[in-house]
Image (cartoon, grey):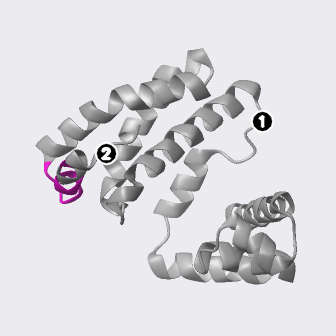
Amino acid sequence: MALAEKHYPLIEAAQIGDPAALDRLLQVCQPDIRRYAQRNCLMSDVDDAVQETLIILSRRVQSLRVLVAFSSWLFTIVRRECRRLERHVFGIDHYDEQEAEHWLAARSVDLLRLDLVRALESLPPHYREIILLRDFEELSIHELAQQLALTSAAAKSRLHRARQLMREYLLEE
């Protein structure tokens, strides 16, 4: 899916609201999204994952800050949609993505900041630390593991649990 640099002007035009550029970007990305979804989704979910990914891309392309991150950003969206659809099929979705989206849309930026601060403060210190290092200091998993004297697997596990606790706190309010 590595979109060549030749597509960067198209992405930039879509980011500033050019509807023709956005339409063309969606057309250019769709085959790559489909191939990735076919490898990562249940076969019955491929079309839904592609459609949802294209919708998310069209709505959020303006929030992308770094053009070179476009491909990995898009991969992440497809992967998340595949997982969301799979959780739904197997009935293990503890937190509905639509509920989370609704929760975010219903809050002002200032209220979100306060909610995030409260959620962070509610975490045990070792979970708070790993969230701050990863999401605010932007350390890699390897750097986290080194700084906290953990294995990479333990750092990933702790980060996952910390994010899970944050989500529980935020969505249960």
- Which span of residues is magenta-colored? 10-18
38 in relation to 72, above or below? above
Q: Is residue 12 left or right of residue 107?
A: left
Say which residue appears at 85% left-offset and 83% top-offset: 125
Residue 102 position in % (x across, y down): 52, 54
Q: Which residue is mark 1?
A: 92
Question: Which of disc 1 and disc 2 is earlier in sequence?
Answer: 2
* Mark toward the viewer: 2 or 1: 2
Residue 103 appears anywhere in the view = yes
Secondary element type, mark 1 = loop
Q: Quadrant of residue 32?
A: top left
Q: Is residue 159 left or right of residue 38?
A: right
Q: Is residue 68 left or right of residue 10?
A: right
Task: Characterize the magenta stretch by its predominant secondary structure.
Answer: helix
Q: Amino acid at mark 2?
A: Ser
Q: Quadrant of the C terminus?
A: bottom right
Residue 107 position in % (x across, y down): 50, 70
Decide whether residue 13 is among the magenta residues: yes
